[in-house]
Amino acid sequence: MTRLLLITDDTPAQPLIAALSSAADFQVTLRPRLADARSPLSAGAFEACVFLPGDLGADALGEIAAVRALVPQLPLVAVLPAGTATDQQQRVLGAGADIVLFRPVNLPALTAILQRLGSRIAADPAGLLPAPAPVSLPKVAAMSTALEVLRDFSQVLGYSLDYRQLTQHFILKLREVVGVSRIAIFLEPGAVDALPAVAAADNSRLNCVAAIGVPGELVECFALSRKSGLGRQLTLRPQILRAPGASTPPMLDPKIVREFEVLGGQVAIPINDRERTLGVAVLGGRLMGGEFTDEELLLVYHLLEELGLAVKNSWLHTQLVSSHRLFASVLDGITTGALVAGPDLSVLYANRAITGFLRGGHDAPVEFNDLPSAVAVKLHEVVEKGATVEPFFHESPAAVYRVSVIPLRSAAGKLPQTALLLLEDFTRLNAAQRAEIESSNLQLIGLIARRFAHEIRNSLVPLTTHQQLFDAEINNAEFRESLKHALTRETQRIQRFTEQMLLLARADTPPSELAPLDELLRSSFAKSRDFAGVAGELDVRSDLPPVMLRCNRASLGHAFQEIFLNGLQSSGGEPRLAVSLNAAPTSDGRAELVIQVRDTGGGFAPESAGRATEPFFTTRNTGVGLGLTIARRVIEAHQGSLDVLPRHAPGDPDVVIRLPLPR
């Protein structure tokens, strides 16, 4: 990663600035003019400088010359507007720029140029600042004792909440005891957000969170990285690291040497939480000169370990507070009323929705006594007795609420306990459901009325016709026979429709009598044949002994009539119905009667079979479509079932009836 200084106040340069800032290879510091970056620049905080002047006046050339004079070895690239004259390019090069580019600039090309120019610092990393001469001072005997006391005392740092203030006070005390000239603490970004996707930010950058003896401008723009330099070295090998000097061998990584020089540090110590490295502490020399002993650095290492634990606790506390605020905001924003009652029935939390429900929008705090008595009783049972309360509805004169009480049990499971009360406003939904039911009822009534009127009108047509001819044709024997036939047929039709409506409307009566099945089938078929006016035949085949069914004879007989009538009306010519009787065991070990009915018609179409028992569904021009609906209802009242099936093979039944056999 290259620390890059961009000097520009030119608005058209923003796209290039954004591209450089988002590139992973650069750590970019943006300043409008040289004066704002003079201190960190002179300290060697940057490895390259890009100058983007808005115009090439004397001020711009003077800035370039000043940068070159301040840091002679620093790579300096000038990016000029397109179309800049040749003589102006020469002035920029003469002022000290290493290379001149023109906008728009290709980012990969600029990156390659900066890497090649940066090789001069990599070849001589110690050429920017002279290393201080080591001074030998007598060891202070009390130093180790003071550090031991400070290390023991630092255990209380784990209770601190603000890690930045904690770290600043820590280094003040450390300098007071150790007498170090400068200290800089670099840490990864803390987890400050409750959302995992946000909290899991990139922790490769180590920012300076506290420093003493380091210029503020340098602290603002200088950071370490886990990908290179000190950050990478101490992350991979968390050991105390000394800067190169008279008593230490030279280091191979020029990046580490440069970072020591920029920060004026002599020692780098990892900061960990006993699990992993959280950051790096860079210490300068003593105020009175001299080097740190290994024993002193080991004690400082342990102190920084305690600091790491405290910082981790601070981050956890911040994340906990953030989570609390997040969930409080969520609860406050939802339309469901939420209230948390403590073990003493005090209201610990109430969101805006429940305040509006109970207080009518007033801002006064909600109290337990504000709850409706029926709701308060249930909440009291959960809090005091640990009862389980199923969600229920509470209706007031103005609203309907769905109430849920959720216990928030403690780890020990002690009573009384905290509980969460939720009130969902179902007023509008309840009103909408009622309106929908009323609308559905009106539609059903309208459908019944239309079918009733249609069926009655069909019956009245032949009767009205005979009435009109009555006076003129009464003495005609053929007319009298026709009138008799019309009265019989249409009266039967109206009577059948009336019986259907009564069976559909009245409550199911339990089976109370024993009736022979064969007689019930044949009498029902005879009535269906008479009503249809055809000469059909019924073929009953059974391998069972005579069966007696416990039933309601009248209603079950009517169900069979409707099934047989449907078969007769579906068959052409001379209809013939085949009925087979069998017995089959059920899952609970009982015997079950299976009645299969097949007519000589074409059978049910697949799309009609699934709807055949729906009320008012019919494929004919006559009838109201209630026959099979009534049959299914009656059979289900006898603890049986009725299935209408399409034919897949020639011998498949059209209707299958299952009824329990008496034990």
Image (cartoon, helix red, strand yellow):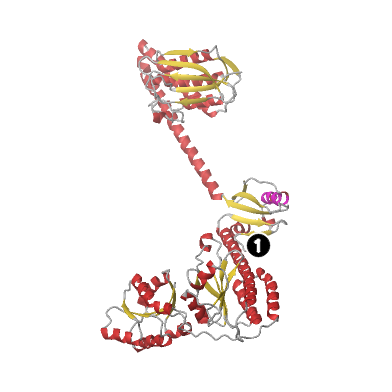
Q: Amino acid at mark 1?
A: Pro
Q: Position of residue 560 (x, y in %)?
A: 49, 19
Picture mark count: 1
Residue 546 coordinates in the image, percent (x, y): 55, 12
Q: Nearer the viewer, residue 393 or 662?
A: 662
Q: Residue at x 69, y 75 (%)?
A: 148
Is residue 151 on the magenta stretch? no
377 inside magenta stretch: yes
User: What's the magenta region?
Assistant: 374-384
Q: As drawn, is 576 to the left or to the right of 271?
A: left
Nearer to the camera, 126 or 532 = 126
> In the rendered image, which residue does mark 1 sit on?
365
Quarter of the image containing the N terminus? bottom left
Q: Does the magenta stretch mainly form a helix, a strand or a loop?
A: helix
Q: In this picture, is 586 found above or below 403?
A: above
Q: Is residue 173 visible?
A: yes
Image coords of residue 493 (percent x, y): 44, 21
Q: Residues within 10 Å of mark 1 (few under 14, many from 20)?
A: few
Front one among 142 and 20 = 142
Q: Residue furthest top?
A: 477
The quarter of the displayed image where residue 190 is located: bottom right
Q: Quadrant of residue 34?
A: bottom left
